[in-house]
Image (spheres, rainbow, N blue to C red):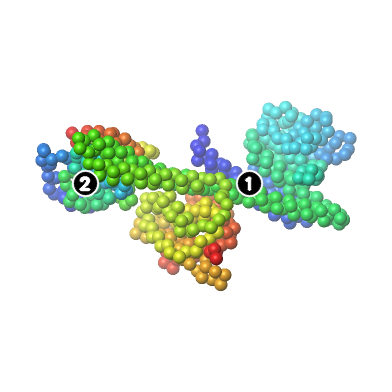
Amino acid sequence: MDSIPFTDTPPARVAECDPPVISVVDDDESLRRSLRNLVRSVGFRVEMFASAEEFLTSPRREHTGCLVLDLRMTGMSGLDLLRRLAASNVRVPAIVLTAHGDGEIRQKCLQAGAVAFLDKPFRGTALLDAVRLALR
Amino acid sequence: MPTHREDDEATLGRLRRRLRTLSQCTHALLRAESEQALLQSICEILVTGGEVRLAWVGYYEDDAEKTVRPVARAGDGIDDLERLESSWGEMEIGQGPIGIAARTGDACWVDDIRTDPRCAPWRAAALARGYASCIAVPLIAHETSGGVVDLRGTLNLYAAECRAFDESAVEHYRGLATSVAYAVTALRGHLADDLASGVTALRARAERKRAEEALQRAREELAHVTRVTTLGELAASIAHEINQPLAAIGADANACLHWLAAERPDLDIVRETLAAIVKDGLRAGEVIARIRTLLTRSSVARGPCDLTGVIRDVLPLVGPEIGRCGISLEVSLAANLPQVVGDRIQLQQVLLNLLMNAAEAMREVPPVRRRMAVRTTVDHRDDGPWAIVAVEDAGIGFDEAEATRLFDAFYTTKPGGLGMGLSISRSIIDSHRGRLWATANSDHGATFRFALPGVP
């Protein structure tokens, strides 16, 4: 498996006063934009990525405090992304957006490091609660 | 407990068998040269069709016992038939389904031979041969003028399962009995060679039309079931397509609430987000509208139809599934494509089927080769412009032997495939006075094209 470029140096610590960065990985432009709105509306900073591949190769992901990602995406799936991160020893709490019926894959996501699942369509407050919990 | 999908598949299997049987019976009705040969082939077709184990036709005798005499038969236990006495009279052996059907002039069926008292005289013999339910249908045709064509006989069928003759089966066999009554009368009429034969021939023509209409209805029903099955295969993708905008609406609405709760809300961003919510609402609604259209049972009336619109209707349904299979899709649409006259739902079904087949053909090929294209072009012919839609894939393709069978009903290379898709697609395009054909690509895969005459 390919290594992920920036694992040589540990992610830089976000200064205490800076709001945490939430990285949103979703191939659906509309959902990505709305997730940005929701997370920003309560004061978090947001980075957006249109695919798992973009997240893996972009330097913008470095300050990620929590990952919100879609399970089903064109190209690399959310599960594959989690596995790549786990294999490279990158530990980021991840909240996975799933569809009804993805039950079997959840277990695999948990093993790969997911901390929460939200079935789409989810309640905005539920997502924010999950993000706050993940950031603790 | 069977799942909906199993139910659908069982229904589809039944319809498929019935369509095949009906089609074969129609051929027999139109080609029969003698009464005996006709009745015999109908019995054989019904037994070969698999829904019944024994089929026989009996005519009423005018002897003292009012015997029902077998004149044609096929299936299990035919050797014993002479000993299975039936009567159309009022005595005990006239109280079974055959006697009742003969006296009432309407179909009579038994759901469970083991328990139905009307079957008492024959129960042991029937159970020994493995029959669990049966039906007797009088060979009578009721005309709209009030006249009756009565062969004075019944078509008798026996099945291995209980309740084999449900409402739709009874209707099916009633229709068939009517057809047989007309066809036999026509054959007798021709032999008599009198004035009546002209009238009978007219009736036979009317009956042929009825049979063709029944065949058409069965085809439409099958097409509907096939559409539902295809949508079932796409269910996960379609749910995803609806959930995406719904999730976006929820997140955006929450964001708006947070922004509005601020001391000095930024109304511009709220306004912009509300516009996005409206757009996502429409997007979810459009997916649902497309599905509802395809789930419509009957076809809509034909009218001017824009094939570019048909493609734009279908791509959002199947596009996500194509993407999930790692297939890249190229769409190239001619700007000046002529309008055609057609049934929009049926044409959507043809395209959906071609796209699903193309995706299926690439399931086993290396990811780098998984690409397909939808192209429309205009062909200017002597009789005017034709619209051509091509679906190209780089999949496993087909060889010469397969080429001749591609459009045959029940021919399939897919595991679990029904073998109806291309056959139905071709019949739809034929009925639009168009043409559907396939060519092997020079490198990989196949291209399926259909051409329809443009509206002048």
Image quadrant assignment for residue B129: top right
Residue B401 in percent (x, y) is at 54, 63
Left or right, residue B230 beside residue B127: left
Residue beneath label 2, please?
A: A47
**Residue B380 in view:** yes
Q: Which mark is residue A50?
A: none
Q: Which mark is residue B18?
A: 1
Residue A131 in percent (x, y) is at 23, 36
- Image quarter where the C terminus of chain B lies is bottom right
Name the chain letter of the residue that bears numbered label 1. B
Residue B416 in percent (x, y) is at 50, 48
Q: Nearer the viewer, mark 2 or mark 1?
A: 2
As shown in the figure, which amino acid type bears the numbered disc 1?
Answer: Arg
Left or right, residue A66 beside residue B52: left
The answer to which of A96 and B267 lies nearer the viewer is B267
Asked whether disc 2 touches disc 1, contact meaning CB atoms under 8 Å apart, the reply is no
Image quadrant assignment for residue B137: top right
As shown in the figure, which amino acid type bears the numbered disc 2?
Answer: Glu
- Give the distance between the C-alpha atoms of the residues marked 2 and 1, in whole angstroms: 59 Å
Same chain, marks 2 and 1? no
Name the chain letter of the residue that bears numbered label 2. A
What element does badge 1 sit on? helix
Mark 1 packing: few (<14 Cα in 10 Å), some, or many (20+)? Answer: many
At 34% from the left edge and 59% from the top edge, which residue is drawn? B368
